[in-house]
Amino acid sequence: MSELKNRFTWSYSAADEFETCRRKRYWSKYAGWGGWEKDAPELARKAYRLSKMVNIYTLTGNAAERAVMWTLRRLQAGATVAAQEAYQAAARPFLNEAWRSSRQQLWKQDPKKYPCLREHYYREWEPETEREQVQRAKDTVIACAENFIRLVWPRLKEVRHEQELVTSASIGTHPPRRDPSTPFHGRKRRQQ
């Protein structure tokens, strides 16, 4: 693969960001360049790692997207799906893995693979607040899956898989692990 180059580019949004805050433009586009390399200067590595930071809302949105996509695939295959099932199968493992890796600061070694949760990095949560946020994230993902099943799926039934247009990619491709110490862990449901 050829070497990536940080070429100077300009646009209206770049000009707007530059005029709003020159430091923001520098740190977001230039300071972290090459920070993914193992031999990069520490400042570039840190700027790059911090540019990959996400918050609980972004993480919840990514989990909701996973739950909806899992639901879509199951519905397209002719299965009956409940929102809780979508959460358990697709969102919860993702959330647990992201939470665990953020807590363990695995993003320091590989920020592309492991998310750094802003709330962990800045220690913004007390234990009670953290539990509330975990429950809120879970409720949001389940509500998104329920709304998809109830409102969107009836309009999409006729769309075949090969007609779909890919519009986004989720973060984190590593396989989730079951870990009882993670907040989204729950008891495994018995098969009925």
Image (cartoon, rainbow, N blue to C red):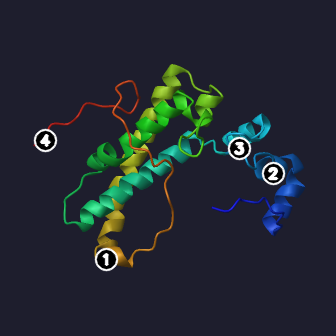
Q: 10 Å neighbourhood of mark 2: few (<14), some, or many (≥20)?
A: some
Q: Which mark is residue 133?
A: none
Q: Position of residue 8 (x, y in %)?
A: 84, 63
- Is there a contact, CB below 8 Å, between mark 1 and mark 4? no
State the separation of the CA atoms marked 4 and 3: 44 Å
Amino acid type at circle 1 is: Arg
Amino acid type at circle 4 is: Gln
First reached walking from the N terminus: tag 1 or tag 3? 3
Quarter of the image containing the C terminus?
top left
Q: Secondary structure at mark 2?
A: helix
Amino acid type at circle 3 is: Tyr
- Is there a contact, CB below 8 Å, between mark 4 and mark 3? no
Q: Which mark is residue 191?
A: 4
**Above/below status of 24 relative to 178:** below
- Residue 74 versus residue 40: which sits nearer the camera? 40
Which residue is labeled 1 in the image? Answer: 160
First reached walking from the N terminus: tag 1 or tag 4? 1
State the separation of the CA atoms marked 1 and 2: 43 Å
